[in-house]
């Protein structure tokens, strides 16, 4: 199981596909992990190197004491990519992963040649919403309460009614409250409207029509900060389309990878 050890955190990652190919990096949402991408990776074109990782406080990465800053989450991605010798990648970030994507592209343009900002925003929620979740996470039954609310916001009603959300509900219930609260604090303190509006790289925004966390208008407003960006609205899905609409989601990625010429790019 690959791990990268840094001074304050150990990051678990998966490095798949063609080792010498141009790279795609996948950064997940709050309360999920590398498995968010399980249905997507097999649908990506051959020839790519596909790297995904667990954010600090998530999955098999370590959980430093909360709270975390967005700067720390960005630094983790940066250090992992340097550790793996990745440059000129397409960085796909979903939700908080999309915030990391924006910050990383501003900080280290050598690492990111194109961006997919999926179900995310330059700013997500309000300090009050995040303070409430940070207080709830460590309470007895707190993660269950958060898991319930998350599934309501993340998935279309019919998906929840049919019980298809159940594995994700259980995953969220079992999530380390410190890791959840730590990353929630990072989101709470982040407003990327100004830095993101300075980006000048190919960008695709992906939104789910039934996303109760980062609605389509927020995703569109965010990618509109970057001149020339594209926007795709996926119907019948919510906040985590790699889970409930993998074929449509992968098709968006494949079209974008084609349009950027990434597979024709010379690997680093
Ligand atoms: O938990 C949510 O409602 C949605 C969310 C915000 C940031 C993230 O990664 O997930």
Image: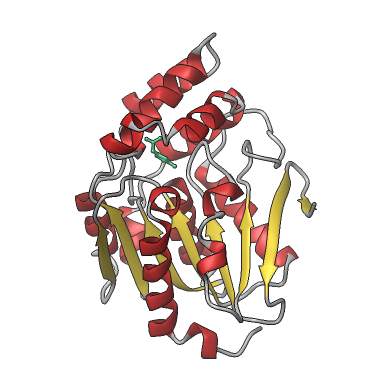
Of residues 129 and 14, the one drawn nearer to the viewer in this rendering: 14
- In the foreground, 177 or 197: 177
Instruction: Name the quadrant containing residue 77.
Output: bottom right
Q: Quadrant of ligand 1?
A: top left
Q: Residue at x 39, y 76 (%)?
A: 256
Q: Quadrant of the C terminus?
A: bottom right
Front position in the image: 27 or 66: 27
Q: How many marks?
A: 0
The percent position of residue 232, horizontal first and vertical second, equals 27, 65
Whether 154 is drawn above or below 35: the answer is: above
Q: Residue at x 47, y 22 (%)?
A: 134
Q: Is residue 99 left or right of residue 65?
A: left
User: Which residue is at 43% across, 39% downward?
Assistant: 187
- Of all residues, the one furthest to the left in this rendering is 217
Residue 255's quadrant in the figure?
A: bottom left
Q: Residue at x 40, y 62 (%)?
A: 247
Pick out the residue farthest to the front.
Answer: 162
Q: Is residue 203 left or right of residue 235?
A: right
Question: Is any atom of residue 189 visible in this view?
Answer: no
**Which colouring convention does the figure follow?**
secondary structure
Residue 197 vs 99, above or below: the answer is below
User: Does the rendering let one see residue 78?
Assistant: yes
Residue 111: image x %, image y %? 57, 71
Q: Position of residue 86 (x, y in %)?
A: 66, 72
Left or right of 184 on screen, residue 222 = left
State whether residue 27 is above or below residue 125: below
x and y percent of residue 55 in the render? 60, 45
């Amino acid at each position: 199981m690959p791990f990268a050890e840094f001074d304050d955190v150990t990051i678990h990652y998966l490095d798949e596909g063609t080792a010498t190919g141009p790279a795609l990096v996948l950064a997940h949402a709050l309360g999920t992990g590398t498995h968010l991408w399980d249905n997507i990776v097999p649908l990506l074109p051959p020839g790519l190197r596909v790297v995904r990782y667990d954010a600090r406080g998530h999955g098999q990465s370590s959980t430093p004491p909360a709270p975390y800053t967005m700067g720390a989450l960005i630094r983790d991605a940066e250090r992992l990519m340097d550790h793996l010798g990745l440059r000129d990648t397409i960085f796909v970030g979903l939700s908080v992963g999309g915030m990391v994507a924006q910050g990383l592209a501003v900080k280290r343009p050598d690492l990111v040649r194109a961006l997919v900002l999926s179900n995310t925003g330059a700013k997500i929620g309000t300090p009050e919403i995040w303070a409430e979740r940070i207080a709830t996470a460590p309470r007895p039954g707190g993660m269950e309460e958060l898991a319930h609310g998350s599934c309501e916001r993340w998935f279309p009603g019919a998906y929840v009614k049919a019980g298809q959300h159940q594995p994700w509900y259980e995953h969220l219930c079992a999530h380390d409250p410190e890791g959840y609260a730590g990353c929630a604090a990072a989101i709470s303190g982040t407003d990327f409207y100004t830095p993101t509006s300075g980006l000048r790289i190919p960008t695709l925004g992906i939104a789910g029509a039934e996303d109760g966390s980062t609605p389509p208008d927020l995703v569109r407003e965010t990618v509109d900060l970057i001149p020339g960006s594209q926007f795709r609205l996926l119907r019948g899905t919510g906040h985590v389309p790699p889970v409930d609409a993998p074929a449509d989601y992968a098709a968006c990625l494949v079209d974008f990878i084609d349009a950027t010429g990434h597979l024709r790019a010379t690997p680093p």
